[in-house]
Image: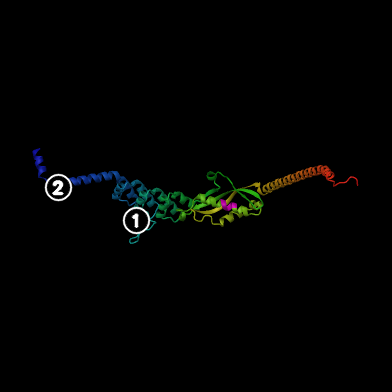
Amino acid sequence: MIQTMLVIGAIDPWAIGGLSILVIVMLGLVIIAIKYGSLWFEGYNCGAQIGLFELVMMGLRQVNQKSIMKAKIKAVQANLRTEKDKTPGVEIDGTFVTTQRLEAHYLAGGDVTKIIEALVASKNAGIALEFDQAAAIDLAGRDVVEAVRTSVDPKVISCPDPQRSGKEFLSAVAKDGVELKVHAQVTVRTNLEQLIGGATEETIIARVGESIISAIGSATLHSDVLQNPGMITKAVLERGLDSQTAFEIVSIDIASAIVGENIGSRLQVDQAEADTRVARAKAEQRRAEAIAVEQEQKAEVVGNQATLIQAEAEVPKAMAAAFRTGNIDTKG
């Protein structure tokens, strides 16, 4: 025991310190290999080009390494442009999917998996979509995968939408006074260039509904609309209703058109009834005025009779006064 202590004491302290550091480094490497080795090896075999040190730094920055690695592997397998496709001396543009961009998007609160899915779908469909554009769409709160799918496979929007407005038909009146109830289907595809800041489906529905009502109101006869619904859809499409929206209108189809009330006839009947009531009121007014005039005349006659009777009563008095004064001579 004493000999062992003497041997240890004879060792250089620097050697002991170096050995301790080496042990610590080796222990750290073992821990890193255990924690990240399998993930790094998977990425290495798939050509993801994410180093073991990068995985460690991601962990220190609170980045989900598995999400980044899976996204990068999927990008490589889909033949998206990555660091390995970089030409020396040429800057990396927005079409490249790099580890740094994936990590930055993750830290910004984005979904790297959806970004790669959208880029793969757009590449397969021949749609121009860069990483930066897809990232901006995702960070704006839009579903970038659904946007690409809708751009490839247009979807149909009901106008009006019963779930939004509670109405199944648009109501409009032609010039002949007949009401038409119309339900339209609008086929749209996503306009990726205007998806950020562009108006949503509600704007499309409102614009199309307003234009359909205006077009029906401009029709001379409701039968013209029933016989040729295309005149309505053509007039609506010519107005460029998809301007400043996130969608491009592909087509507008009148799914159903139902004849409603004859608003013009009903208004005429209501007007005739109103005119009749006005005429009756005026006749009643004239009758009341005539009765009032008659009563006034009767009162005037009665007043005149009273005046006459009063005047007749004064005659004997005048005669008596004349006799007394001698103004009347009975001998005469």
Secondary-structure class at tag 1: helix
Give amino acid for label 1: Lys
**315 on left or right of 199:** right
Q: Is residue 134 magenta?
A: no
Discs 2/1, front = 2
Of helix, strand and loop, which one carries label 2?
A: helix
Which one is in front, 298 or 310?
Answer: 310
Circle 2 crowding by C-alpha within 10 Å: few under 14, some 14–19, many from 20 = few
Q: Main secondary structure of the magenta part?
A: helix
Residue 208 located left or right of residue 38: right
Tag count in the figure? 2
In-front residue for pair 320/109: 320
Looking at this view, is 121 or 247 the one in front? 247
Q: Quadrant of the N terminus?
A: top left
Image-based side of 312 in relation to 232, left or right:
right
Q: Position of residue 240 (x, y in %)?
A: 54, 57
Q: Where residue 61 sits: x, y (%)?
A: 31, 48
Q: Residues within 10 Å of mark 1 (few under 14, many from 20)?
A: few
The answer to whether residue 210 is magenta is yes
Distance, label 2 to label 1, CA atoms, is: 43 Å
From the image, tell me which residue sits under label 2. 15
- Identify residue for label 1: 84
Q: Could you tell me if residue 165 is visible in this image? A: yes
Q: Is the Cβ of the residue at disc 2 closer than 8 Å to that at disc 1? A: no
The colour style of the image is rainbow
Residue found 61% across the figure and 55% down from its top: 231
Say which amino acid is labelled 2. Ala
Give the residues in magenta. Answer: 209-213
**Residue 147 pos. (x, y %):** 46, 51
Q: Earlier in the sequence, mark 2 or mark 1?
A: 2
